[in-house]
Amino acid sequence: MAEMVMDQAQRPGGLDRAEQGLLGAPVPRWEGAAKVTGAAPYAYEQSPPGTVYVAIVPAAIGRGQVTGVDAGGAEALPGVLAVIHDDPRMPAGEGNSRAKPQPNTGRVYHYGQAVAMVVAEDGEVARAAARLVQVRYEETPGRFDVEKQAPIREHGLGFLPAIDKGDLDAAMAAAEVTLDETYTTPVHFPAALEPHATTAWWEDGQLTVRTSNQIAGAARKTIATALGIEASRVRVLAPFVGGGFGGKTGVGPEAVYAAIAAERVGRPAKVVLSRRQTAYVAHHRSHTTQRIRLAAGRDGRLSGIGHESVAAQNEIGEFLEPVPFGTLPLYAGENRRFRTDLVRVDLPATGAVRAPGEAVGTFGVECAMDELAHRLGIDPIELRRRNEPEVDPTNGKPFTTRRLLDCYTQGATRFGWERRDATPGSVRDGEWLIGMGMAAALRGNFTVEAQARVRLEVGGRAVIETDMTDIGTGTYTILAQVAGDMLGLPMTAIDVRLGDSDFPASAGSGGSFGAGSSAAAVALACEDVLAELALRMNAAPEDLRLKGGQVSAGGRSAALADLVRDKAVEGHGRMAPGKVSRATSQASHGAQFAEVAVNAVTGEIRVRRMLGVFDIGRVLNRRTAQNQAVGGMVWGLAYALSEDGVVDTRDGRFVNPDFGEYHVAVNADVPQIECEFIEEVDDAANPVGAKGVGELGISGAGAAVANAIFNATGVRVRDFPVTLDKLL
Ligand code: MOS
């Protein structure tokens, strides 16, 4: 076992000696073709012999109690095997590694909550029968309108405590220039293309769950907890996941339902949520209300910054959108206040969605900075420069790598920022008003424990095994690149096996920590392999050179395959956070730029181009990193202009829980989007020096679009999405 606890900045020696030239190279995604041609099977495409189908029965009220279930009509339908509604293990909501799913007591916490299931011989019968299940309720009035609920200040939810440093009120009173504005964002659905789905089966008391989930190891524990069995009796498989976007970080009721159904009928069982059910049974991003206060001198230097917000959660959800998280290390200013208050609602659970905190939080703070720049007559980039802190201004910790100023400079040059006219509404192209905007991007970087195994098999092929997932992010590819480089093997000589909870535990995919932490674990496992190879070469590990399947040391050379002719070499790697993780302030950074055209007659908004320059530490794969960054920018564009989950405040239903009415960006909305990276290896982040990229691209992207709209029109919209009616 090669281990690195991040007590200091360090990296495996073998990484520095790597000569295969794979790390960072724009290698295409290994599983890409399989995914788009249908060769990569998804969770619902599993059909072990005898598989039965499960359909969820959703609650038809917004709040209350189930008082009875009449399953007669459903059970009478040919092909129906069981209607299950009284198993106390059926969760009422989602669970995760920290929170056990709320057990079923018949209580209805929100409209569309799973309250029963039908098990049938085929999917159509199951769905038809689900509509025949008569559920009786005692309905109680619900809290469906977030704006009408009083915020709760002491709530204990979420990981981000309230922070109050200095005296923001006094700073505001004393400042030459102040800003005090409120920004609001609506419900966002994660909107992964592959809906939540699970196929589950039991063999000799062992449960196998083939599911669509971002974190296989945590899912195993959560499912075991929900069922009241040992985790060792559960195996979670998630080798292919069709997008997660945070919506698959926990375990939804449907996965546990499948396991219970399989147990009840003694056959494999599978379930898929419809698009509409996904909106209710899985979580969404909360509405947010954000009050931003900035206290500044005429020179733009901040003496105070406040980001006080409100986010929603229902009675059983454990999460709270950490709205000001990205603002904490962003700008200087002695007097600082950050908090997120809670409003309790009777709506589906809110949870982690695409950069929880920063995605929406950067809308508030980065629009506010743009407004302050405008009031002061200072260029928005210059204003940010003047407020660039030396150390984390909230906790006093040193930054690890922070190239934010370089992102501004490089981005401004490439985007042609000097062509921007600071006077809003002054640039026209026919009937279109043209504007440019920018914003900072920041996403906290997390060091999360991860393990991996690398086996150099007899014959010379390498096999990587970890329970890490690939949710479309490129994990398969980058892990092969790491191992290929360190073991001197081409990509074709490496097999990567992921998404099996029986494999060494990783952090999974979430919080932008997946690539860095799992790549680190693989690098360490390779280091372990190198140590054994060195023994077989009778050489010191640091003298080994590996390239093209050859190993050399001290003038001697051998084929890698020969070194493992008789006996495979197996290496284990483990990376864990430590002192340096706790003592430093870590983040990925970037500068976002957008140019928009707003039709002066109709108010139609078109984004013409976007550029992001990102500081992400080591780039593991230029192509997949770019896919991540640009994908994030597309999300930013989409939530700036169109994503808007609407709640019917009369009964707690969503008005638009589908792709027909909830508008994510489509190709026609997406203009020329470019990104580039400033690569500085961050040895304090993890042993491969890569910082998170997955959620960085969305941070600040929406604000850049909103700021460009202001520059184009002179209209400041503080309520996302910015739709044309708000401009006219
Ligand atoms: Mo992410 S929203 O932490 O998968």
Image (tube, helix red, strand yellow):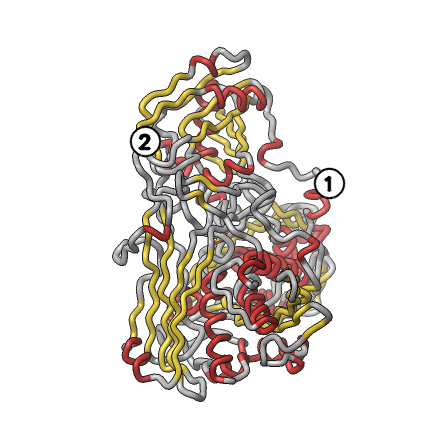
Q: Establish if 522 lies above or below 706.
A: above
Mark 2 within 8 Å of ligand 1, using the beta carbon: no
Residue at (46, 57) in percent of width and height: 185
- The image position of residue 226, as x and y in percent, is 37, 35
Q: Describe residue 350's horizontal placement relative to residue 567 as left or right.
A: left
Q: Secondary structure under badge 2?
A: strand
Q: Describe residue 495's horizontal placement relative to residue 697 as left or right.
A: right
Q: Amino acid at mark 1?
A: Thr
The circle on residue 139 is 2
Relative depth, front residue between 36 and 65: 65
Residue at (37, 47) in percent of width and height: 145
Q: Establish if 249 lies above or below 66.
A: below
Q: Is residue 591 visible?
A: no
Residue 391 appears in which quarter of the rendering?
A: bottom left
- Alpha-carbon distance for marks 2 and 1? 47 Å
- The image position of residue 645, as x and y in percent, is 50, 48
- The image position of residue 107, as x and y in percent, is 32, 32
Q: Earlier in the sequence, mark 2 or mark 1?
A: 1
| Screen quadrant of the C terminus | bottom right
Relative depth, front residue between 427 and 329: 427
Number of numbered discs on residues: 2
Q: Which residue is mark 1?
A: 37
Q: Describe residue 383's horizontal placement relative to residue 43 as left or right.
A: left
Q: Specify few, some or many for label 2: CA neighbours under 10 Å numbering under 14, 14-19, or 20 or more.
A: some
Mark 1 within 8 Å of ligand 1, using the beta carbon: no
Q: Nearer the viewer, mark 2 or mark 1?
A: 2
- The image position of residue 471, as x and y in percent, is 58, 48
Residue occupying the far left of the picture: 154
Relative depth, front residue between 2 and 168: 168
